[in-house]
Amino acid sequence: MADDADVIIVGAGLAGLVAAAELAEAGKETIVVDQEPEQSLGGQAFWSLGGIFLVDSPEQRRMRIRDSHDLALEDWLCTAAFDRAEDSWPRRWAEAYVGFAAGEKRSWLTQRGMKFFPIVGWAERGGGNAVGHGNSVPRFHVTWGTGPGVLEPFVRRVREAENSGLIRFKFCHRVNELTRTGAVVNGVRGDMLEPSDVERGRRSSRDIAGDFEFKAQAVIVASGGIGGNPELVRKTWPQRLGTPPKCMISGVPDHVDGRMLAITEQAGGSIINRDRMWHYVEGIRNWAPLWTDHAIRILPGPSSLWLDARGKRLPVPLYPGFDTLGTLSHIMSTGFDYSWFILTKKIIQKEFALSGSEQNPDLTGKSWRQVLGRATSGVPGPVKAFMEKGEDFIVEPDLSALVARMNALVGGEPLLELAQVEREIRARDRQLDNPFSKDMQITALRSARAYLGDRLIRTAKPHKILDPANGPLIAVRLNILTRKTLGGLQTDLDSRVLGTDGQPVEGLYAVGEAAGFGGGGMHGYAALEGTFLGGCIFSGRSAGRAASRAVG
């Protein structure tokens, strides 16, 4: 039987599109198979803020940030904390990726039409010591156009290749099996699903209309992770992060279900680091949901007071934006799966942003007028909508009324005592009476404002929370939000999937989140942020180039 194509790609998200574009440039015929309908082209990346990790970029240098390959690699390795025998390939991927981020990454992307917002964000600040977790300097570059802006250059290239006959898309095709001849993977087999015209992000039809089988010389698995499958998340939840939360909301659509990981494992691929994952602690329920338990992540500046479910302040250095998984571990140790921000109107005006392309219409729509309006017109529109309609937001001028409503929102026995909450806030406020302080969060605030980017758009001037002039008071219930799979299919630097014997499975490649963004987990235990989209791009490029060399 003749091959249907040179290469089959399973998954039409960012990593799959990058691989397809590379194959098309090499003149290879490719079939892209995806269980979702055409309107979901681009997958999870469409919904992202478009954060890209770059090192020693022109944007950094204009903001007076001194960065280097060596500093970035040290930060990465300290954060990843590789400590397993199977971390050999993930570490090599990490080293290669940091080299890419400090080298040709920006020029390679801008040559394809991507542009970046001029102010660099400072994510995962760490807050421990110099050899601990976190970014020593700001490295989070927001793509002009957010997630759709990241996708656009690659969508354009694959659509051009589709018009020339090099790429064929097979939407609503769900792969059930990787076919083999002996030990060589040579195709896919599965179900044709009924066409679905649902809005992007909504659950699509799983009714079967037929079956299919395609043959090729190579198959690239680009199917994403498990974040939309809460049962699988709980099954692989690591003990180091405590008991799996009973209540989790989802930062990714339902189709991010992990099916292809098990299917690829059955075909001989080795999955490593299943227990490494990345979930956020600042999740709020979307008041206008698209997918099941649709969650949005707050991107907070560093000023909000963070309390656990009983009103006790989180310990040093678990401040907003400092250490995602450290905070997750602590919250789960409290016996509850939620926590609280308490803040003021002044803080929410300056510091609150929401993750996602749809929550940032100014950046997504590439409107400088709207961007400038965000900085001058009070609470941003999307944030204001959540304040008015979101179930997790409470606004009151008086602390006693605020605490009463916080207890009512949770229900059951009241956990928050007004006296305890007031003590925490007043103690914090007293630390602002002097230009020095024993409160490390106050010290961190003042340090943050020494960075021009934070001073301009991300960090409010330190002020007393209980001063009525800064009000009203705002409380936000924060839930655990599922997001990324850090482990995955083990791959070499050509994105070839390795078997349990450490040797490549002939004809089989994996990219993006399915491969732990490279090697089966190039982030190790934790991420520096802005590295997920970049990992999809880097691994997709690697697989596309390697597969184009391997096929006849």
Image: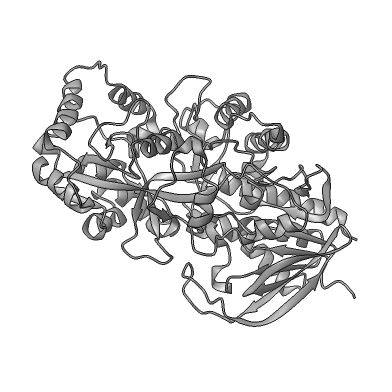
Q: Residue drawn 68% across and 65% down?
A: 158
**Residue 543, x across and y down, in percent:** 75, 52
Disc tally is 0
Left or right: 158 as drawn, with respect to 408:
right
Q: Is residue 355 above or below residue 194?
A: above
Q: Residue drawn 46% across and 51% down?
A: 482
Quarter of the image for residue 524 reads top right
Quarter in which the N terminus is drawn = bottom right
Q: Is residue 76 above or below residue 380?
A: above
**Residue 11, x across and y down, in percent:** 65, 63
Give 336 or 138, whichever is nearer the viewer: 336
Give 539 or 328, whichever is nearer the viewer: 328
Residue 326 seen in the current view: yes
Left or right: 443 as drawn, with respect to 346:
right
Give 15 or 393, whichever is nearer the viewer: 393
- Rendered image coloring scheme: one colour
Left or right: 399 as drawn, with respect to 125:
left
Q: Is residue 51 above or below residue 81?
A: below
Quarter of the image for residue 312 reads top left
Quarter in which the C terminus is drawn = bottom right
Q: Is residue 500 above or below residue 153?
A: above
Give 529 or 162, whichever is nearer the viewer: 529
Residue 111 seen in the current view: no
Q: Residue drawn 61% across and 51% down?
A: 513
**Residue closest to the far bottom:** 209
**Residue 225, x across and y down, in percent:** 58, 54
